Image (cartoon, grey):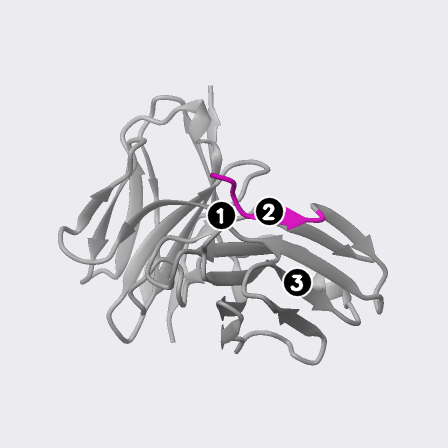
Amino acid sequence: EAGVAQSPRYKIIEKRQSVAFWCNPISGHATLYWYQQILGQGPKLLIQFQNNGVVDDSQLPKDRFSAERLKGVDSTLKIQPAKLEDSAVYLCASSLDRSTEAFFGQGTRLTVV
Amino acid sequence: AQSVTQLDSQVPVFEEAPVELRCNYSSSVSVYLFWYVQYPNQGLQLLLKYLSGSTLVKSINGFEAEFNKSQTSFHLRKPSVHISDTAEYFCAVSDRLGGADGLTFGKGTHLIIQP
């Protein structure tokens, strides 16, 4: 069974630029999560989808971050414009539904300079 | 609101020695507790979880954790570690029964196994 795929693995951008991350969840998984993991901290949930609907985006900085999962499969997370404090690993995870184990991708490491 | 405290950011231990990684939580409602492991250059993997029933839960690779409600703890232990156990370990808590809903993670503990 293929795991959660994320791209790119690494990205370096200048502050005020925009960036997008892509996630392909495990086939058939209805629930998709985006987490932000700043160096030295645990992952923090940014947004959670159930199929193509948003379940929880309470911790998403909506003035600069956006995410979508238009067809209920792949998802993209965008930052525009990026700030230095956005430097982090962005993790995508998926689960069959909200009551089962989530599987995580390897993450995208973003460096904002 | 819920929170998780992992007191040790780094734990060095010799191979074949026992280890304990500490985790304390705070929550105003029922809790479900998890330990995740992150091996170098890999994603997070669920190691073990406590949802209900027996307070002692075990993983397939020899780790175990005990839910202690009075001390609000969920420490992770292994009687004899191996080099391959070198990884970052995250404790997490949720107030919703499920795999990853509403998870709050601790800052992680880096387990370093010395030969």
On the picture, is B55 further left or further right than A42?
A: left
Q: Spatial distance from mark 2 to mark 1, Cα to Cα?
A: 29 Å
Q: Spatial distance from mark 1 to mark 3, Cα to Cα?
A: 32 Å
Q: Which residue is label 3 attached to?
A: A76
Secondary structure of the residue carrying numbered label 1: loop
Prevailing secondary structure of the magenta residues: loop
Q: Could you tell me the amino acid type at mark 3? A: Thr
Which is nearer the eye, B10 or A86? Answer: A86
First along the sequence among labels 2 and 3: 2
Query: Which chain's residue wears label 3?
Result: A
- Seen as rendered, the residue at the extreme bottom is A63
Q: Which residues are magenta?
A: A1-8
Which is nearer the eye, B46 or B76? Answer: B46
Q: Which residue is label 1 attached to?
A: B9
On the picture, is A70 further left or further right than A54?
A: right
Q: Spatial distance from mark 2 to mark 3, Cα to Cα?
A: 12 Å
Which residue is depicted at the point 83% across and 65% down?
A15
Is residue B106 within the magenta segment? no
Q: Could you tell me the amino acid type at mark 1? A: Ser
Q: Which residue is label 2 attached to?
A: A5
Secondary structure of the residue carrying numbered label 3: strand
How far across and down, in percent of the image, does residue A107 sit? Answer: 61, 49
